[in-house]
Image: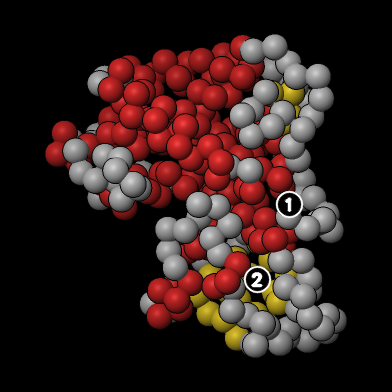
Amino acid sequence: MPPARKRTRTYDPAKIRVAVLAQFGNVRQGVHTLTEEQLARPARLGEWSVRELAAHLTMAVETVSRNLDRPEPDAKELALLDWPFATAARAGDIADGTRELACDNPDLDALYARVEQRITERLATAPDDRLLAARTGAMTLADYLVTRTVELVVHTDDLNRAAGADIPLDRQALAACTRLLADALAVKAPGASTEVRIPPYAVVQCVEGPRHTRGTPPNVVETDPLTWIRLATGRTEWKTALDEAKVSASGERADLGGLLPLMG
């Protein structure tokens, strides 16, 4: 289990709802423009094709609707910052479900339209504190929607890189995704000797060692949001990001290579 955390960041539930719907809308429009040649390309995620990745993106949203249709659990089981560490065990089930979904839904436009309509209707009446029986553990709807920004942003980036697309990232969704993964690093490596800066969205302190109190910290890591997200999810290796000057790291405790990725 991850170490005990110092604090929990709060998110505005109304803004997160808007962000999830906005990013899914961005993906829907982008997928509509993909050619059959683009859809047949490898997604560079295991054996998935771009078509299968596009189908998988609907699962990130449909799971909200599906869980709202199910009976409410008796008690909350998972806090928001527990979620990044609880996803790896489901990788096999997700891969199998994705292939089946893509096979059963050759018309991606129809699939996206159906999923978008369902989540829009269900979120219109569902309260933020409603518990969802997510497979990773029962969570509030408000917390679970924050995790959806991670799924949507990460896989939109995957889709853009694999298909050569240019699907935009909603600013609020990108901010929430960046912050949740930054806070997960602070959970995994508690401490205050290293400052990780991901402007303009997040700054966290982590890694055991002497605590810094004034002036420029002796150990500083800085990168942009997309590079951070790729590092945190294993899309980019630490050494590669350093070599390509996509991340700067100064100080003897600024090497995060042994702590990444946070999610597989």
Residue drawn where x is 54% and y is 73% of the image: 257
Residue 100, by quadrant, is top left
**CB atoms at circles 1 and 2 under 8 Å apart?**
no
Q: Which disc number belongs to residue 39?
A: none
Q: Which disc number belongs to residue 1?
A: 1
User: Is tag 1's residue or tag 2's residue first in the polypeptide sequence?
Assistant: 1
Q: Nearer the viewer, residue 238 or 20?
A: 238
Residue 246 in view (yes/no):
no
Residue drawn where x is 77% and y is 50% of the image: 9
Q: Which disc number belongs to residue 196?
A: 2
Q: Amino acid at mark 1?
A: Met
Answer left or right for 18 relative to 245: right
Residue drawn where x is 16% and y is 34% of the image: 36
Position of residue 262 relative to residue 99, above or below, is below
Q: Position of residue 18 (x, y in %)?
A: 59, 32
Q: Position of residue 105 (x, y in %)?
A: 30, 19
Answer left or right for 27 relative to 70: left
Q: Residues within 10 Å of mark 2 (few under 14, many from 20)?
A: many
Q: Amino acid at mark 2?
A: Val
Colour setting:
secondary structure
Residue drawn where x is 79% and y is 71% of the image: 191
Position of residue 37 relative to residue 68, above or below, is below
Q: Nearer the viewer, residue 130 or 234?
A: 234
| Secondary structure beneath label 2 | strand
| Secondary structure beneath label 1 | loop
Position of residue 256 relative to residue 228, above or below, is below
Residue 194, by quadrant, is bottom right
Q: Position of residue 25 (x, y in %)?
A: 44, 31
Q: Nearer the viewer, residue 200 or 185?
A: 185
Residue 16, by quadrant, is top right
How many marks overall? 2
